[in-house]
Amino acid sequence: VFQLSVPLNFLGSVYRELRQSLLDMETLFNLQKVNVAIKEPKDAKPLLLNKGGEIRFENVTFGYREDRPILRNMNLTIPAGKKVAIVGPSGCGKSTILRLLFRFYDVQEGRITIDGQDIREVTLESLRKSIGVVPQDTSLFNDTIEHNIRYGNIDAGDDAVRAAAKRAKIHDIIESFPDGYKTMVGERGMMISGGEKQRLAISRLVMKDPPLLFFDEATSALDTHTEQGLLHNINSVIKEKARTSVFVAHRLRTIYDSDVIIVLKDGSVAEQGTHETLVDSDGIYSELWSAQEMLFSEEEMAQQEKEKA
Ligand code: ATP
């Protein structure tokens, strides 16, 4: 992918489509690292988002190996245009849900639908074009920062690139680099931090502007202050455009304002509701929240002590 993308920069519009799919492939490899031959039926039709992007898992059973199910007879609904969070213990299958939605794997039983269409019956291209992912770890192309953001929408003008960078809270940092937006990054370019990479990935997503947005621990490398500012910006994009968005998260502080919070345990949905209803119901979420809040106030206190010293 990396070697190909450079010569393609100099070719005409025939290759634009191809470059866009290279970007999607990059996302694919990031999420999963292994390519699996998933096929579409001959009569596959493009995915039609005619209900605003409602996602449903109906009696879904899935395991990477048949003898070890990760999701068991799972039912869940991600309402159109809403912000939904998926939380639960490490290894319970949160990222797996995103991989299934992108159709890197097919379910063993049940079905996944988007606006009523089984995702196995639509074209892979239309499915993957509709989804934008900010993965846990983004890789950058060996190119300028500007190009790395523009890969989200290769026809975008300079103003749009800058607006996306501002939304992702990275514009000022880019301006402070010696060559600004022309700074080379990637393996052969300037080293940038994990948090900066995450913000570039988010600006790319703002550029792509897909109807369905997935965030897989997308702000985990940021300090609390920067993270809160960035989440505020992400929320404003989601609300403004009524995008269906799914956040996989460990730190509940980053998702407590979601319209729906889904708590997974042992391969199915253990609890769901808003932050308030879940805290009141004294279940898994409520316990996790108390534990994390305690940890958070300890960290905050330690930070304040450090600042005083
Ligand atoms: P975390 O919070 O730690 O990121 P998660 O809830 O997102 O975890 P998943 O990444 O969905 O969990 O993984 C669920 C289970 O599936 C884990 O036990 C993991 O080891 C297993 N798993 C994940 N990817 C694969 C794979 N490609 N092949 C086999 N097993 C896998």
Image: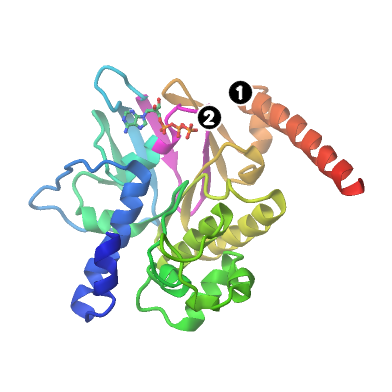
Q: Which mark is residue 284?
A: 1
Q: Which mark is residue 150?
A: none
Asked if the residue at label 2 sits under 8 Å from ligand 1, the reply is: yes
Q: Amino acid at mark 1?
A: Ile
Residue 298's place in the image compared with 15, above or below, is: above
Q: Dividing the image into four quarters, tell me where ligand 1 lies.
A: top left
Mark 2 = which residue? 88
Residue 70's place in the image compared with 176, above or below, is: above
Q: Amino acid at mark 2?
A: Gly
Earlier in the chain: of badge 2 and badge 1, it is 2
Check disc 1 and report its element: helix, strand or loop: helix
Q: CA distance from mark 2 to mark 1?
A: 9 Å
Q: Quadrant of residue 287?
A: top right
The residue lying toward the viewer, choosing from 158 and 249, is 158
Q: Quadrant of the C terminus?
A: top right
Count of numbered tags: 2
Residue 124 on image: x %, y %: 22, 53
- Seen as rendered, the residue at the extreme front is 188
Read off the magenta span: 71-95
Residue that appears at 62% across and 38% down? 251
The answer to whether any part of residue 288 appears in the image is yes
Residue 238 on image: x %, y %: 53, 59
The residue lying toward the viewer, choosing from 284 and 179, is 179
Residue 66 on image: x %, y %: 24, 21
Q: Are marks 2 and 1 in contact (CB under 8 Å)?
A: yes
| Crowding at mark 2 (Cα within 10 Å: few <14, some 14-19, many 20+) | many
